[in-house]
């Protein structure tokens, strides 16, 4: 570094050498953990490299290592030095609850339209009672009750097993039910398939990407997506490539995907290998609420065959079907409108795993959206050879899903009446979500902001999310406009998710001019009406100014 450096760089190096010399002999060292010296020795040359080597030559990894070294020096933390590069690369990405400028006055009682978290009124359980022994092997017990859980039923999984270590794949009763449900709703197109329980879809994603992704592997996904999953891929060294979406045609743009793959060797990603997998949310997509047609799904699957990539089908919302809003028209899911069989046949979109004949689809499902997120229970289905490897991973990491959660689910399943009874419960959930959506849309459509053409609505066919598109003036970058609109929402007391925060490339963040909204969290219809009114007034505040 010294031989080719300018005087400024030489001075910086001298300062750091002096810094190390001072710490080596200074009595102040007595007041520091001895680890500080080690950290200083590491951090100082790296700081010098930062100044001497051109910015372009410093990789993200190196920059993060520098930051960690500096943190080590400042905090004298012995623990961080043992972390892997993979752990140091992990990030938490927030897409709501973001910082608001000081000059924006927050509403005293905001109503959330942002979190995809069901109101507890959707949980089909009201009470659970536990009998605790006062001492080991004793006879005296103390009764404790937790409300909002279901009384008066007998669990098929007794506490002797539920409270003990369980099979990694899951207790046989719940595994059996999940297989029956999958066969009833989305039976795989081949015989040699299996499934394993997980600790919810987040855990499923972690295990699937651990299974598939090597450093440098490419994973495709919709350009707007559930962004936290991206860093799960990057943690294993994978790279993410966006696929355009067609808002007028149900979500992922199959034609754009075909063009991307056909021109891979000459396109913007020509230096990267062909994709290892496609991650997609085809039904009630997060954040857009869009649902891909069966025709487009078939085309995507054919592309997977042609270009030999896996499909990771994330389907947390598929069992929540939504009727189309028409003022004065009865909800299509009123009692007696559908049997379990007719609901599956007429309402549920065809799954990728049902189209699959080769074992190239891994399907992720969860009990979070139609039962309760706190159970942290889901399952992965796919070819038995893949499921076997996932179970091996779980066996040395998370082990089995919660026994109490499995017992609670089995008690509810017993009450509902098995797989068909579960589908009938999902019909009731679909009815309630449709009612809430209709109340919300009726209020929006009657607002002055809607009548003035300030926004339009992409009505969802499934799931928890509603897309509202803002009619901003023509332009290439709408990020600032969305931010300013969000400030108006904050002032009016309504929380939303900005579309730009659900994009993982600047290109798509710039072009996003939509909000992700949900009617899952509000207390009742009155709160939904109030939220919609506040939202519409926020639009008027922005566009009328």
Image (spheres, rainbow, N blue to C red):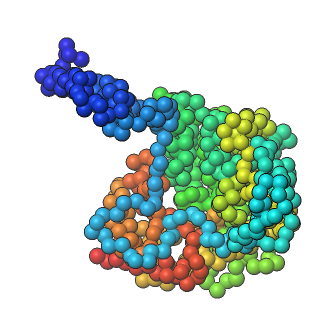
Relative to residue 23, is residue 210 drawn left or right? Answer: right
Looking at the picture, how far across and down is residue 496, in whole percent?
A: 46, 67
Pick the residue in front: 241 or 144. Answer: 144
Relative to residue 397, is residue 522 drawn left or right? Answer: left
Pick the residue in front: 114 or 470. Answer: 114
When asked about the image quadrant of residue 8, the answer is: top left
Image quarter of the N terminus: top left
Q: Residue at x 41, y 36 (%)?
A: 77
Q: Residue furthest bottom?
A: 328
Q: Residue at x 61, y 71 (%)?
A: 119
**Looking at the picture, does residue 489 appear above or below residue 389?**
below
Q: Can see residue 482? A: yes
Pick the residue in front: 246 or 208. Answer: 208
Q: Residue at x 39, y 48 (%)?
A: 506
Pick the residue in front: 70 or 51. Answer: 70
Looking at the picture, how far across and down is residue 542, in whole percent?
A: 34, 73
When asked about the image quadrant of residue 319, the answer is: bottom right
């Amino acid at each position: 570094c010294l031989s080719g450096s300018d005087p400024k760089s030489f001075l910086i190096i001298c300062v750091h050498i002096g810094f190390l010399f001072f710490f080596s002999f200074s009595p102040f060292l007595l007041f520091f953990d001895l680890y500080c010296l080690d950290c200083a020795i590491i951090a100082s040359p790296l700081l010098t490299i930062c100044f001497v080597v051109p910015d372009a030559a410093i990789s993200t990894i190196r920059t993060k290592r520098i930051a960690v070294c500096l943190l080590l020096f400042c905090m004298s933390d012995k623990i961080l030095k043992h972390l892997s590069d993979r752990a140091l690369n992990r990030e938490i990405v927030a897409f709501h609850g973001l910082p608001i400028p000081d000059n924006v006055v927050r509403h005293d009682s905001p109503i959330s339209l942002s979190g995809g978290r069901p109101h507890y009124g959707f949980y089909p359980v009201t009470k659970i009672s536990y009998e605790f022994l006062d001492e080991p092997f004793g006879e005296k017990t103390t009764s404790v009750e937790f409300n909002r859980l279901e009384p008066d039923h007998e669990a098929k999984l007794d506490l002797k097993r539920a409270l003990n270590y369980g099979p990694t794949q899951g207790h046989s009763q719940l595994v059996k039910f999940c297989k029956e449900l999958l066969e009833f709703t989305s039976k795989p197109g081949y015989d040699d398939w299996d499934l394993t329980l997980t600790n919810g879809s987040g855990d499923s994603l972690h295990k699937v990407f651990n299974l598939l992704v090597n450093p440098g592997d490419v994973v495709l996904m919709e350009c707007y997506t559930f962004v936290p999953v991206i860093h799960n891929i990057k943690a294993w060294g994978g790279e993410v490539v966006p696929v355009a979406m067609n808002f007028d045609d149900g979500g992922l743009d199959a034609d754009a995907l075909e063009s991307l793959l056909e021109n891979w060797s000459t396109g913007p990603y020509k230096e990267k290998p062909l994709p290892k997998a496609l991650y997609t949310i085809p039904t009630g997509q997060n954040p857009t609420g869009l649902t891909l047609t069966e025709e487009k799904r078939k085309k995507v699957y054919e592309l997977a065959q042609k270009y030999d990539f896996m499909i990771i089908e994330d389907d947390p919302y598929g069992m929540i079907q939504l009727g189309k809003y028409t003022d004065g028209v009865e909800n299509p899911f009123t009692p007696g409108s559908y049997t379990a069989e007719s609901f599956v046949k007429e309402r549920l979109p065809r799954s990728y795993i049902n189209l699959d004949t080769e074992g190239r689809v891994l399907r992720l499902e969860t009990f979070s959206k139609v039962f309760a997120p706190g159970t942290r229970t889901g399952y992965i289905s796919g070819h038995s050879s893949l499921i076997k490897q996932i179970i091996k991973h779980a066996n040395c990491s998370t082990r089995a899903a919660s026994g109490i959660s499995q017992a609670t689910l089995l008690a509810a399943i017993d009450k509902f009446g098995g797989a068909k009874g579960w589908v009938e419960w999902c019909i009731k959930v679909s009815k309630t979500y449709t009612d809430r959506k209709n109340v919300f849309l009726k209020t929006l459509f009657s607002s002055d902001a809607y009548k003035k053409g300030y926004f339009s609505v992409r009505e969802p066919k499934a799931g928890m999310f509603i897309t509202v598109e803002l009619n901003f003036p023509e332009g290439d970058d709408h990020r600032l406009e969305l931010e300013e609109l969000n400030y108006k929402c904050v002032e009016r007391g309504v929380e939303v998710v900005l579309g730009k925060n659900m994009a993982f490339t600047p290109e798509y963040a710039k072009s996003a001019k939509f909000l992700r909204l949900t009617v899952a969290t509000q207390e009742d219809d009155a709160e939904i009406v109030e939220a919609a009114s506040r939202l519409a007034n926020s639009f008027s505040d922005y566009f009328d100014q």
